[in-house]
């Protein structure tokens, strides 16, 4: 298949592009290299792919509609995977207009560009944050959603835009709600990356509240397998649907997360508790029964194994091993003609 991945040079996007190329798909990664974190870091994410015959990287912005039409018209794409978005719950509360413009306006631009080309199949990267403070039990796709941050609101609104285009433009759409993805190449400000950096540097680790905030930490390879199954799903089914992608395990508190990192690294964490910011939820936990039934989704990597893999990657990176960004790549050595 020919597949367009927006946000393809990012954390999840780069892993997905590798997996798709490895299985034989042709992939175009679209990214605007938002300065939320360094451009060079994103280029390293896709470094091992950039010379492959089945991969192209294009720099485009979702907020420039005509450039999206140009890319879509020239690609004969079978499916679009839309992962591009401004990330960060707390940052969205400081700059709401930018998040609304990119995450909601950019999604509208992409959907409209798709109507002007032949592609009508979309996998949309949504977020567990749309559920808000769901009381107690694992979140199901038919639960009431109550976003408590601007970021979460833009993700839920993006889902609704997709629903509209499915109903009015005959799009086949699958929205995937990701639950706290982690692993190699994770963004530097995210908890596991930040805690690991501070732990290995013997610096204090700030924990919000009393450390009892819980998250459903899901390893990036499991998320990638879920997205790949979602791509196959939208090529075989019409209409609109929403599916959770989580770990399938009970959520883990921040205190337990830091303790596991300390045990795996054989270091003693220095924890400092601080007030919880607005916009964060108390707990996330996915009911993944629907994903198992529709997509054959069954997570394989538990938290201890995933944290061990992340520590190995981070240590290689800290030692100057930039090549470790491409540690997953298993595709053949075919390269573009010069």
Image (cartoon, rainbow, N blue to C red):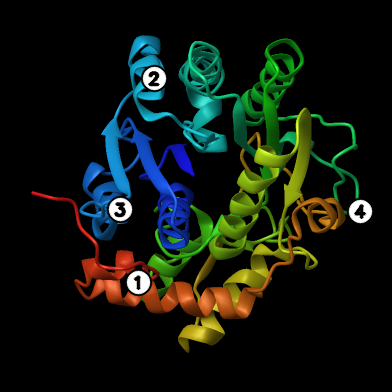
Q: Secondary structure at mark 3?
A: loop
Q: Which mark, residue 327?
A: 1
Q: Dot 4: what SS? A: loop
Label 1 with label 2: CB-CB less than 8 Å: no
- Disc 1 vs disc 2: which is toward the camera? 2
Quarter-wise, where is residue 47 in the image? bottom left
Q: Residue furthest left?
A: 338
Q: Is residue 328 above or below residue 33?
A: below
> Residue at image x 38%, y 66%?
197
Q: Which residue is mark 4?
A: 137
The percent coordinates of residue 26 (x first, y second) are 39, 46
Q: Earlier in the sequence, mark 4 or mark 1?
A: 4
Q: CA distance from mark 3 to mark 1?
A: 11 Å
Nearer to us of marks 2 and 4 is 2
The answer to whether any part of residue 214 appears in the image is yes
Q: In this figure, what is the number of numbered marks?
A: 4
The residue closer to the viewer here, 58 or 94, is 58
User: Which of the two discs, 3 and 4, labels the residue nearer the N terminus?
Assistant: 3
Numbered label attached to residue 46: 3
Mark 1 surroundings within 10 Å by alpha-carbon count, few (fewer than 14), some (14 through 19), many (20 or more): few
Cα gap from disc 2 to disc 3, whole angstroms: 24 Å
Dot 2 lies on which element?
helix
Q: Is residue 296 left or right of residue 51?
A: right
In the image, residue 79 above or below residue 101: below
- Coordinates of residue 192 in the picture (x, y in percent): 51, 63
Tell me the mark number nearer the camera, choosing from 2 and 3: 2
How many angstroms separate mark 4 from mark 1 (CA)? Answer: 36 Å
Q: What's the residue at 47%, 34% (across, down)?
A: 84
């Amino acid at each position: 298949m020919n597949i367009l991945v927006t946000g393809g040079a990012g954390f999840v996007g780069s892993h997905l592009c590798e997996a798709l190329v490895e299985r034989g798909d042709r992939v175009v990664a679209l990214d605007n290299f938002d300065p939320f974190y360094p451009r060079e870091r994103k280029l390293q994410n896709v470094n091992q792919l950039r010379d492959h015959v089945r991969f192209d990287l294009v720099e485009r912005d979702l907020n420039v509609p005509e450039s999206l039409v140009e890319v879509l018209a020239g690609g004969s794409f079978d499916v679009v995977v839309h992962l591009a978005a401004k990330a960060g719950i707390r940052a969205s509360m400081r700059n709401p207009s930018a998040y609304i413009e990119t995450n909601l306006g950019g999604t509208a631009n992409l959907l409209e560009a798709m109507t002007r080309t032949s592609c009508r199949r979309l996998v949309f990267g949504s977020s567990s944050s749309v559920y808000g403070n769901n009381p107690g039990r694992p979140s199901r796709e038919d639960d009431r959603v109550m976003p408590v941050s601007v970021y979460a609101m833009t993700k839920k609104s993006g889902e609704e835009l997709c629903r509209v285009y499915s109903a009015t433009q005959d799009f086949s759409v699958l929205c995937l709600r990701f639950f706290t993805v982690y692993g190699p190449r994770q963004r530097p400000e995210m908890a596991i990356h930040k805690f690991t950096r501070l732990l290995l540097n013997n610096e204090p680790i700030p924990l919000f509240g009393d450390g009892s905030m819980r998250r459903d930490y899901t390893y990036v390879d499991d998320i990638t397998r879920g997205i790949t199954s979602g791509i196959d799903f939208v090529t075989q089914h019409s209409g609109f649907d929403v599916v959770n992608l989580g770990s399938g395990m009970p959520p883990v508190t921040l205190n337990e997360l830091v303790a596991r990192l300390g045990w795996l690294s054989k270091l003693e964490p220095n924890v400092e508790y601080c007030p919880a910011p607005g916009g964060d939820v108390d707990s996330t936990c996915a009911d993944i029964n629907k994903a198992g039934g529709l997509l054959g989704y069954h997570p394989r990597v538990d938290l201890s194994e995933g944290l061990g893999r992340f520590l190995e990657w981070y240590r290689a990176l800290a030692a100057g091993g930039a090549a470790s960004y491409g540690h997953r790549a298993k595709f053949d050595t075919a390269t573009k003609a010069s």
